[in-house]
């Protein structure tokens, strides 16, 4: 069974709650954390009998659904700023951290052999670099056999926090990208084939020769996609490893950020992975269904306490204990039971 089928199956298991349990936990949003949320939900169901129905529909969809109060919580990799949270009566906190990686489908090229820097990656997504044997790619990869073939660019078609973090990084790495496209959960892509969710991009890359895309690392790993290394802010070539993700995440100052608004792309440090990101939960301060709201908090508390090992197994980074303690104080102060 491939990764996508496994995750869908886990999601279905997570969704199959008993009819007797009234305060079902419903959530929707980011595809970035779907693998770990599915794994947590399955373990939580076995341990407590309580289920989680999480729709992996993209950060944009998650924000819309929580604003419309159709779910107990929304999930987004593009955090909302404090003024937006106040306007919508929402509480926001980071749940787990992970990383976005460039993935390619190139015959004869193995994971980690190919390297990009931000300028070159931006030029590919701008359509300025259109063939694999372009001089800029060859300069970074003198020992890699590159085909004289057109690059098929794959990007997200839905409102996406993965896209937000990817385009935020490109905007920091390339003045050209920043001025022409910029950052956002949805942007006016100059080139590319659209696919829905990290799942869709993964599937498209796996089926399309000479393609390039960007996905959360767990999707690349579980789908056995070929990932590329990156040149980071310090000018060092790094590979997507937990150590590199942790190096970037160590720069986060969660305590001083209103609404925990922290972006982890392009962090300093020789070992830092340049496209590291947190994924966030959104809940109403005063929920319509308070029983479901409290049940969701129980699940998130359990995940912080008991879900770290599962997160690490999928190459996510658990939130530090000090941040979890801060988040629990936020729950107590802001979410009405």
Image: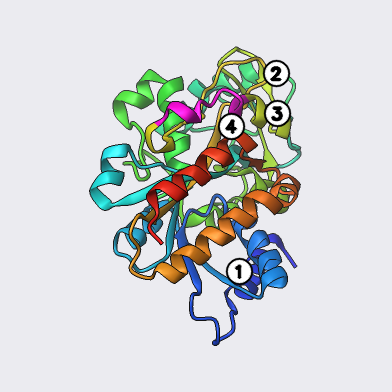
> Which residue corresponds to mark 3?
239
Q: Which residue is drawn at 65% across and 31% down?
A: 245
- Secondary element at image label 4: loop
- Looking at the image, tell me whether mark 2 or mark 1 is earlier in sequence order: 1
Residue 323 lies in what quarter of the image? top right
Res. 11 mark: 1
x 67%, y 65%: residue: 44
Q: Distance between the residues labelled 4 and 1?
A: 37 Å
**Foreground: disc 4 or disc 1:** 1
Please check the rendered image and state whether residue 63 is part of the magenta-colored stretch, yes or no.
Answer: no
Can you tell which of label 2 and label 3 is closer to the viewer?
3
Residue 174 appears in view: yes
Q: Helix, strand, or loop for circle 1? A: helix
Range shown magenta: 248-257
Tag 3's secondary structure?
Answer: loop
Height in image: 309 above or below 258?
Answer: below
What kind of colouring is applied to the model shown?
rainbow
Give SS at disc 2. Answer: loop
Between 52 and 13, the one nearer to me in the picture: 52
Q: Is 298 rendered above or below residue 307?
A: below
Is 197 above or below relative to 220? below
Residue 254 lies in the magenta stretch: yes
Residue 59 placement (x, y as % from top left): 42, 52
| Precedes in sequence: disc 3 or disc 4 | 4
Q: Name the residue under label 2.
A: 142
């Amino acid at each position: 069974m491939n990764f996508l089928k496994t995750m869908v199956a886990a999601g279905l298991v997570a969704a199959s709650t008993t009819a007797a349990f009234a305060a079902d936990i419903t959530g929707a949003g980011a595809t970035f954390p779907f693998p770990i949320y599915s794994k947590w939900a399955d373990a939580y169901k076995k341990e407590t009998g309580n289920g989680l129905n999480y729709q992996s529909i993209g950060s944009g969809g998650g924000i819309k659904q929580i604003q419309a109060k159709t779910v107990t919580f929304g999930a987004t990799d593009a955090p909302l700023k404090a003024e937006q949270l106040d306007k919508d009566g929402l509480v926001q906190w980071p749940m787990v951290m992970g990383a976005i990686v460039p993935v390619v489908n190139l015959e004869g090229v193995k994971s980690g052999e190919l390297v990009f820097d931000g300028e070159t990656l931006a030029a590919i997504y701008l359509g300025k670099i259109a063939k694999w044997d372009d001089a800029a790619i060859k300069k970074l990869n003198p020992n890699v056999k590159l085909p004289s073939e057109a690059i098929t660019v794959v990007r997200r078609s839905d409102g996406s926090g993965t896209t937000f973090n990817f385009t935020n990084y490109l905007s920091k790495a390339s003045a050209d990208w920043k001025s022409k496209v910029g950052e956002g959960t949805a942007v006016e892509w100059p080139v590319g084939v659209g696919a829905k969710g990290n799942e869709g991009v993964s599937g498209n890359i796996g089926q399309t020769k000479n393609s390039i895309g960007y996905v959360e690392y767990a999707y690349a790993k579980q789908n056995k996609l070929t990932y590329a290394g990156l040149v980071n802010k310090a000018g060092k070539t790094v590979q997507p490893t937990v150590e590199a993700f942790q190096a970037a995440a160590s720069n986060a100052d969660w305590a001083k950020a209103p609404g925990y608004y922290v972006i982890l792309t392009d962090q300093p440090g020789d070992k830092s992975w340049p496209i590291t990101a947190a994924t966030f939960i959104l809940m109403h301060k005063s929920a319509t269904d308070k029983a479901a709201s409290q049940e969701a908090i129980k699940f998130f508390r359990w995940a912080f306490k008991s879900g770290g090992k599962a997160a690490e197994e999928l190459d996510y980074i658990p939130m530090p204990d000090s941040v979890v303690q801060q988040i629990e104080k936020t729950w107590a102060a802001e979410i009405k039971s």
